[in-house]
Image: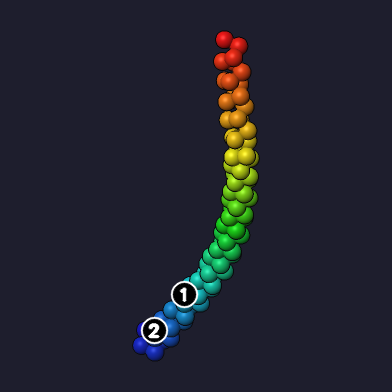
Amino acid sequence: MNPDVAYQTLVIILSTFLAIFLGLAIAATILVIKLLNTLRAVAAKGEHIVDTAAESVDEVTEAFRRNANAVNILKIFSNFVNKDKK
């Protein structure tokens, strides 16, 4: 085989593999970018859910705080009434 022919064959084979791997790399990069965008959207949705839950927990805590004083006053009043009955 002539060295020029072997060299040209090697160049063709290597350029073909380079084109294939370049195409695969571009496709993989596009898929990774799509995956990252999806993960970003999921993280934003999760953050919104956590924020909403935190607000709900704060509202429930505030309701317990407001009612805790009323409950304590009722307990004291109930104990006072029960002591008078005895």
At a point 60% along the width and 30% down the height, the residue shown is 73
Local crowd size for mark 1, using a 10 Å CA cut-off: few (<14), some (14–19), many (≥20): few
Return the residue found at the far top. 86
Rendered position, 81 above or below 1? above
Q: Where is residue 66 in the image (x, y as percent from the top left)?
A: 62, 39
Determine which residue is flagged by label 1: 17
At a point 60% along the width and 46% down the height, the residue shown is 58
Q: Which of 73 and 33 is in front in this view?
A: 73
Which quadrant of the figure has residue 3?
Answer: bottom left
In whole angstroms, how far apart are the C-alphas of marks 1 and 2?
A: 16 Å
Determine which residue is flagged by label 2: 6
Q: Is residue 85 left or right of residue 11?
A: right
Q: Which amino acid does label 2 sit on?
A: Ala
Local crowd size for mark 2, using a 10 Å CA cut-off: few (<14), some (14–19), many (≥20): few
Rendered position, 43 above or below 25? above
At a point 59% along the width and 35% down the height, the residue shown is 68
